[in-house]
Image (cartoon, rainbow, N blue to C red):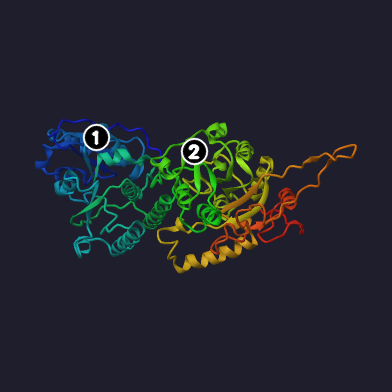
Amino acid sequence: MTIAAKKPAPRRDPGTDFRVGIILVAYNAERTINAVLDRIPETFWDRCAGVWLSDDGSGDATYKMAGDWRQLHSKLPLTLVCQPVNLGYGGNQKAGYHWAIDNDLDCVVLLHGDGQYAPELIEEIIAPIERGEAKAVLGSRMSTRGGARRGGMPLYKYFGNRILTTFQNWVTGVELSEWHSGYRAYSVDVLRSIDFDGNSDAFDFDTEILLQVLSAGGHIGEVPIPTYYGDEVSYVNGMKYAKDVVIDSLAWRLQQKGFGSGHLASVGPDYAMRDAVTSSHQAIIARLSKEQPSRILDVGCAAGWMAEALSAARHTVVGIDQSTYDGVADRMSQFIQTDLEGGIPTQVGGGYDVVVAADILEHLAAPEHLLSELKSVMKPDGFMLVSVPNVGHWYPRLRAVIGTFDYDQRGILDRTHLRFFNRRSFRRLLRIGGYHLALETPLGFPAEALGPGMNDHPPLAVRLFQRFEKLGLKVFPTLFAYQFLCELVPPVSSEVVTLPDGPEPAPARSTQLDPDSFSPRGNGGDAGSNGSGAAPGVALDGNKADGQQRDDGDGGPGIEAGRPKAKDNV
């Protein structure tokens, strides 16, 4: 998540007073603005660091009325701003929160100029933040049973509020009585830590900023407030607001799993271990569990979670990555930090039984150079396991069709990817690197991306999707494969044999690779096949593998080399 540059938190001496400010957003509020200012308790004026009143491009005398009030009440530090254009409800708040940050406030309260919320309760609203119990506090009209309806809330708004709040609580896992109150207070520290500038300028800004507070680890408190509905004009389009809130809440949930831009929820820089049985990590661990204790080079090991699992299976693992994560060296036999774009460092050595390159090639500008170099560190009878995401999967295709194509934080459209591969382009890369494709396994969509508990106890809808996907992986792997996991072997070199009695040397017969012998320590034919989201792998002999890599390459798993070629579906 990219956060716009904001003024850092000030250093204060112990015992310094808690600095509180008020943001008062107003639009066409000439009839109510002075009454709202009058209702700010005079007992609060002395501790108020300032009131920032922003007239958001009103077409009436809101700004003039507030100016007249200020001349009569000079004790309250009131700053008046007249926006030259309408910024929108969310845009007006953004400007106010920057004012709070720039003025080194500790807490800021949001009030509305239409008088719908009670300024008399400011002290109660800020108290949980002042006590350190919350990073945001909402004035709730729903916490008192029947209070909202007695205060005049229209029935359609009441039920709409209840339905949306129930949905948002379900999505986020919190228990708020109301998400949609405009009376709220924020710790300015939490405002410094989130990217509220990237939020909507419309009314769903209130939802987005609460989701960001949750992502920042902040607790949201609630304080009961009275409900008041008068003859004020509402500028909220209820159906559009509800749609935006639902989209924002679902986007937050997906962003927690690495999808989307990450401005509402960020997964952070650490690439975590994939637990789904359909993930490349679990497929690689399952494949290598069949091997005798081996010497393994983990290329692009990240934090070393997969290396730790392989080490627990009695393998000796050396990991290399350009970044150093906390505890990475403790999860493997040796960790070497290096820029993989510059090649393999000499301290890596050689003689590895297995080289693992899981989800790393797409992060390199020239992965063919690394592939070529890795052949020199393997034993003659060694093999490589390599996985890449499939850009031909239905997910990026769908986003392109509906016009929402963009980078994600993780997955196929990871914003750190420098290269994108479908099956045909990946096979071409392997040829350039000088490898034979011995086994290819398409892997399905990781259930863990849909939410917690999806791996062990998926709901019926997810189970039906997985069954459909399993069929799709067999029939149309280039559309349904989320990743391709391939087992590779270096080509067998032809030898020149000198005949004792012959006049000239002759080339030896070319050696064909037996699918069952490319990995003499185990049966590679079952790699990645776990019965859930991964189609059977395709084992190819040396000559056929090379030939099939050179065709259009869209035969599904189980299609033998030598059958008629299928047109590429990407």
Mark 2 belongs to which amino acid? Asp
Residue 240 shown left or right of residue 407 in the figure: left
Residue 262 place in picture, x, y as percent: 42, 45
Mark 2 residue crowding within 10 angstroms, few (<14) / some (14–19) / many (20+) = many
Identify which residue, 98 or 324, lies in the foreground.
324
Identify which residue, 381 or 246, lies in the foreground.
381
Between marks 2 and 1, how big is the CA–CA gap? 54 Å
Q: Tell me the residue that label 1 is attached to.
A: 80
Residue 433 place in picture, x, y as percent: 66, 40
Q: Tell me the residue that label 2 is attached to.
A: 321
Residue 297 sits in quarter: top right
Identify which residue, 439 or 463, lies in the foreground.
439
Front of the two marks 2 and 1: 2
Quadrant of the image containing the N terminus: top left
Q: Is residue 112 visible?
A: no
Residue 371: image tag: none
Helix, strand or loop for disc 1: strand
**2 or 1: tag closer to the N-terminus:** 1
Point 45% across, 57% down: residue: 448
Residue 467 place in picture, x, y as percent: 55, 67
Q: Can residue 331 be seen in this view?
A: yes
Residue 270 place in picture, x, y as percent: 42, 43
Q: Give the residue at the far left of this rendering.
A: 43
Residue 12 sits in quarter: top left
Mark 1 belongs to which amino acid? Leu
Identify which residue, 494 or 139, lies in the foreground.
494
Q: Cβ–Cβ below 8 Å for labels 2 and 1?
A: no
